[in-house]
Image (cartoon, rainbow, N blue to C red):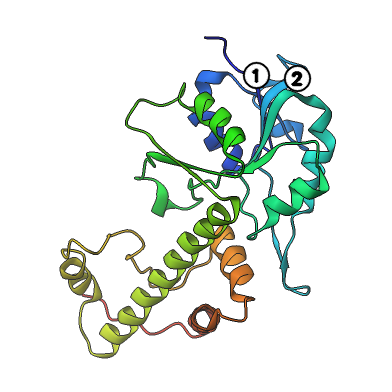
Amino acid sequence: MKTPSTLIVGYGITGKNLHREIAALNPDICDIDSAKIPPEHQGRNYSKYDAIFVCVDTPYVSREKRCDITAVEMAIEQHKEELAAGGVFVIKSTIPPHTTSQLNNCFPLTPIIHSPEYYGDTQHCNNFDFDFTVLGGRRKWCNKIQSMLQMCHDARHRFFVVDAAVAELAKYMANCSLATKVSFCVEFFRIANDLDIDYNAVREIFIQDPRINASHTFVYPDAPYWDSHCLNKDVATIADNPEAYLLRQIINFNNHCKKNLCKVNIY
């Protein structure tokens, strides 16, 4: 079977992790900062691509209360002529719900799907090997990307083909859940500390419940809050929805914890 031609646009955390995942496809790499690209991957092997993976940043603009997808739009505009006939853009960047549909309207001749990444950018993600891929968008486009990615995984890897908006919101739900979990554990850390009880001993019992995953339950006394690039921007983006009452309280609590570090009892 012929190896499909692929391009990764953006070589930050997401781009580098994607590169490791699809190394079997020997993808080309480009980044606005060429110094990020390893010497052995400088230059291009192809002029046209069966798939172009967009891995650029989508920061939150607080003064405008929105997720900035400018870099995604620019990536599509700059590389759309490099897409082979039947090729597909795959947005790995986290984007607000309905963005993929809007982009397909803006670029009507360019197939675009969303496939959220779950790599993470903190130590909490180091021990996780995600054995699933979500593909959101028109089914025939998703199926084409699935057939490519199956060359990089064994038969145990699961693929979920869904509506693009489902894929988009599912990623936000995951990150907002992690932020909520951190805040929940921080609150119990503060409660335990106030009661002169060892939080870590409580935590060890807590995570024995098979319904509870141990991830994100560590609390670091010198920084008892969540403060990663992804959580900061993604929680803020969804918290702007009028129905996101809890998330706005989570943000307020997290900001309170940043400003009011509690005195820690050492056990």
Question: Horizontal placement of 43 versus 93: left or right?
Answer: right
Asked if one can make out residue 58 in the rendered structure from this viewpoint, the answer is no
In the rendered structure, which amino acid carries the disc numbered 2?
Answer: Lys
Q: Mark 2 or mark 1, which has the lower sequence index?
A: 1
> Looking at the image, is 42 positioned above or below residue 60?
above
| Numbered badge on residue 48 | 2
Which residue: 53% across, 66% down? Answer: 227
Q: Position of residue 72 (x, y in %)?
A: 74, 47
| Numbered badge on residue 18 | none
Which residue: 37% across, 39% down? Answer: 131
> Residue 107 sits in which quadrant?
top right
Q: How many marks?
A: 2
Question: Horizontal placement of 124 versus 28: left or right?
Answer: left
Which residue: 52% across, 37% down? Answer: 17
Helix, strand, or loop for circle 2?
Answer: loop
> Residue 7 sits in which quadrant?
top right
> Looking at the image, is 242 positioned above or below residue 36?
below
In the rendered structure, which amino acid carries the disc numbered 1?
Answer: Ser
Helix, strand, or loop for circle 1?
Answer: loop
Tell me the residue that label 1 is attached to. Answer: 5
Q: Nearer the viewer, residue 231 or 162?
A: 162
> Looking at the image, is 233 positioned above or below residue 109?
below
Measured in 3D between alpha carbons, the distance from the residue under mark 2 to the one under mark 1, in whole angstroms, is: 7 Å
| Label 2 close to label 1 by CB (< 8 Å) | yes
Question: Horizontal placement of 186 versus 56: left or right?
Answer: left
> Residue 58 sits in which quadrant?
bottom right
Q: Which quadrant would the C terminus be assigned to in this image?
A: bottom left
| Crowd rating for badge 2 (residues with CA inside 10 Å; few <14, some 14–19, many 20+) | some
Asked if one can make out residue 194 in the rendered structure from this viewpoint, the answer is yes
Which residue: 27% across, 60% down? Answer: 214
| Crowd rating for badge 1 (residues with CA inside 10 Å; few <14, some 14–19, many 20+) | many
